[in-house]
Amino acid sequence: MTDAQREGRIAVVYDLDETLVDTGDSYRAAIARTVASYPAIEGPPVTVRDILALKAARGFNNDWDLTVALLRAAAAGVPYAHAATRPEQLAPEACVDRALVVRIFQEHYLGGGLFEALEGDALAWTDGTPLIDRERLLVAPDALAALSRRVPLAIATGRPRAEALYALSRAGVGDLFTAVVTHDCCEEEAARRADGGRLGKPNPWPLEEARRRLEARVGAVERVFYVGDLPDDMRAARAAGFIGLAVVPEPDPTREAALREAGARHILRASIPPDEVLAGSPA
């Protein structure tokens, strides 16, 4: 590790889902179950391929928005992929009640106890099985702790605050991060601006806010890396002036090309950046 790194002049900001936490059996399952249980709209079962195809497109970082798009495709009787490639063929936005989508999704994802604790309401749409408890950490806690002793770490995620903190605490790594910026932070900032703009990724605001909060704690840093898994993560990193590190566990030339086109500087096979990447030239 270089002197610059020891002095805290670089920092690493992480995405959460599919970067630090495996959400294949939680968020992705909640998307599919929400589409299946939404009333009055019927479509084919949602597959992982359907979800990943939209995640690879621009503007589907938010799983609620992605679920709404799938339902609009189902209501129009067109393939789910058209949500990204032919949005003009989708049913009108008004045909899907976004608030109901969020409600059903959260019931599936949080399960009975956590949903009732956070939302203050009883379940109405699901059996209460908590998908969130299926999540597991994708990195060794000791390796992440070792990195946190060398460089300051932060989180910039599209998750709601309570869910992000729950996942980090449950994995035993919450204390390793100097700052955590979530969907709630974006919504609060958007409300202050009152201009109707959305600040979630690929907008760079959550990454920039993570840097501001981190620097308020540890002092100025010269370079910031953002570790994520989606093209929208890399777009946000490029717009924020961060060095984008894309996690692709297995070689996938098509996916890697899309991530590089979106701004990824390096492709990683694991979420802990190697020393040679952290010591690389500035963006």
Image: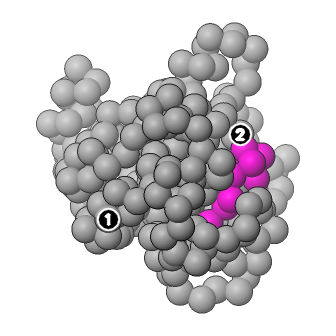
In what element is the residue under mark 2? Answer: loop
Quadrant where the C terminus sits is bottom right
User: Viewed as shown, does residue 32 lie left or right of 66?
Assistant: left
Taking the image as shown, residue 185 lies to the left or right of residue 124, namely right
Question: Is the residue marked by circle 1 packed among few (<14), some (14-19), or many (20+) residues within 10 Å?
Answer: few
Q: Quadrant of residue 65?
A: top right
Decide which of 51, 89 is in the foreground and name it.
51
x 25%, y 27%: residue: 118
User: Where residue 197 sits in the image (x, y, percent)?
Assistant: 73, 24
Kindly identify which numbered label has been placed on residue 146. Answer: 1
State the extent of the magenta-drawn residues as a range: 236-245
Amino acid type for the residue under numbered disc 2? Asn
Q: CA distance from mark 1 to mark 2?
A: 30 Å
Judge whether residue 198 can be spotted in this image.
yes
Where does residue 69 sit, x and y in percent of width and height? 64, 47
Dot in front, 1 or 2? 1
Q: Quadrant of residue 253?
A: bottom right
Q: Residues within 10 Å of mark 2 (few under 14, many from 20)?
A: many
